[in-house]
Image (cartoon, rainbow, N blue to C red):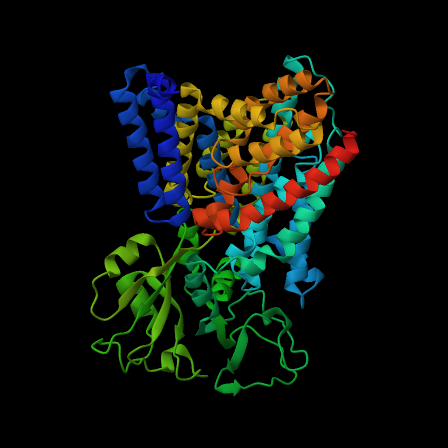
Amino acid sequence: MLDFLMAQDNITMWLTFLVIAGAMLFYATEWASIELTSLGALVSLMLIATLLPNSGFGAEILLSGFSNPALITILALLVVGQGLIQTEALAGLSEKLVRLWPDNPMRVVVLALIIAGAASAIVNNTPVVIVFIPVLASLLAKRNLPASKYMMPLSFMTILGGMTTVLGSSTNLLAAGVARQYGVDSVTFFSFAVPGLAMALVGWLYVLFVVPRIMPDNVGDTIVKRNRNTQFITEIRLTYGHPLIGEHTIAGMFPKLTNMTVRAVQRGSERFLPPFDDITLKSGDIMIIAATRDALTQALRDWHAFDDTASINSQEKERGAMLCEALVPPSSRLVGHGVDQSGFMAQHDVLILGMERRSRMPRELMSEIRLEAGDVLLVAGQPSAFEKMRGLQDLIVIEWSASEVKPRGHALRALVIFALTVGAIASGLSSTVVPAVAGAFLMIAFGCLNIRQAARSIDRRIVMLVGSSIAMATAMQFTGGAEFVANKAIGSLGTSSPAVIMSGLFLLVAVFTSFLSNNATAVLFTPIAIAAANSLGVDPLPLIVAVILGANASFASPIGYQTNLLVMSAGHYRFRDFFIVGVPLVIIVWIVFSIVAPWYYGV
């Protein structure tokens, strides 16, 4: 026994196990950041390879994870998804869903998640998640719901839906292919539909009604909420051809301005105050409005609501405008003066869209409102203009409030690029990485987003997490650690009944898929399952199904499946969020599988 442990190959294997266990501990407890933990694991493995040169792997092999097609695919798909978000290409779909139950936003969110889960039964779940991330993000933004509550359920719903047919995920197809190589052709389209559907239905109940209650509001959502709820005072001048001309009041309100509060309508020297009685808007009217930043942004983008915005919008078509908030400090020379729109535009090349004053909501024109210390101005302009404004004594630019006006005019081209990308991925005519990278390139080349926006869509946590996890998985395979654990675990089941072996194999594979990729786990365990079935003298299909469904139970960590990584940034998740929420789901589907699968397959 001592000789076995002291052999160099076995020392390398045990040291690799130690590194992996340490990395998982740090990921779960967050004693260090994901980036630092990942880098530490990589350095440790490279030291092992250097000190034990017969380990079978070196630095080149370990670092190859950063060029792995799986990682490149995930990053490219994040860029494609960001293109949809920037152009709001799927806003129409989200708006239609919202209109189904305007007074019950939770019902709309649940419906969207169910549609995504059902679609993933016949379409690979990765493109399904790509489609629904911007749709769900838009739904949650309109209803002021935190993304952290529902982005992880989106991934889990599609993973569960993908358990019902062979086409549900790449893992299913890969395991079926490996089984055919070993002479087992019994894995067909609906081979595991019954146990898969039972697991999906029970899992969906947990995901829809339990996960949102136990998932905390993550910090990343708070700034968005603050921006969305703040009310700014602004004015809209109805110039010739404005789409609001001819708008008539109904029950004292303007139907097209339900997302804004009309404070007054100025017509020449006459001022109309709410409630408005039988007013039809005319050219030359000035509307004084209180609205959120989102509503003002939409007005700027959709129907050129503000006079003097022509220059900004013409530039926006090429480079995109930016919105930013600026605080008026007590020492500012602007205090006591009205808003001089033309002078401000000439001096700073930015347009004042609105003003926030916490003490009251004025009804005067912006030129008549005397600025006070503490007022916040919402301004729009080019990024270069804001660079020049930094350091001004009269205005303090609030850095975190900067955002870009989404070029909705590019929505059609973004949809076309997205449809081509998803279609190519779903067709299976090439590996996923090719259409994913091509889609990211086309999104940038056709102006749906710029290089800066594309770069910001890439989460460095994902890069380090995937790169290090691939390195750890590679080290396990090269040292024989993965096969060692698998054989020991299967051997420990001994002469147990096939039902017990199925249950144990499912749980073992589910544990492995949390730190190996699900595809690697399926490839590793499918031959082991066939060999175990042959030794027991039973049909190998039930044990192969245990491997397939166990490999799909990748809920306990973000590295388990690429859809988890896709929603990690969108939901501002930490590693332990997946562990806390995913482990109960793994246990739930394991129990359901252990009950339904042996009964269904008669073992």
Above-or-below relation of 281 to 383: below
Tell me: 94 left or right of 366.
right
Can the viewer see residue 467 in this picture? yes
Above-or-below relation of 285 to 183: below
Residue 15 position by quadrant: top left
Can the viewer see residue 522 in this picture? no
Tell me: 183 left or right of 299.
right
Residue 417's spot in the image, x, y percent? 55, 36
Tell me: 387 left or right of 356.
left
Residue 478's spot in the image, x, y percent? 41, 19
| Quadrant the N terminus occupies | top left
Residue for point 56% across, 22% down: 523
| Quadrant the C terminus occupies | top right
The answer to which of 307 and 395 lies nearer the viewer is 395
Residue 195 position by quadrant: top right
The answer to which of 444 and 101 lies nearer the viewer is 101
Tell me: 568 left or right of 192.
left
Residue for point 46% across, 26% down: 69
Residue 344's spot in the image, x, y percent? 30, 68
The answer to which of 303 and 285 lies nearer the viewer is 303
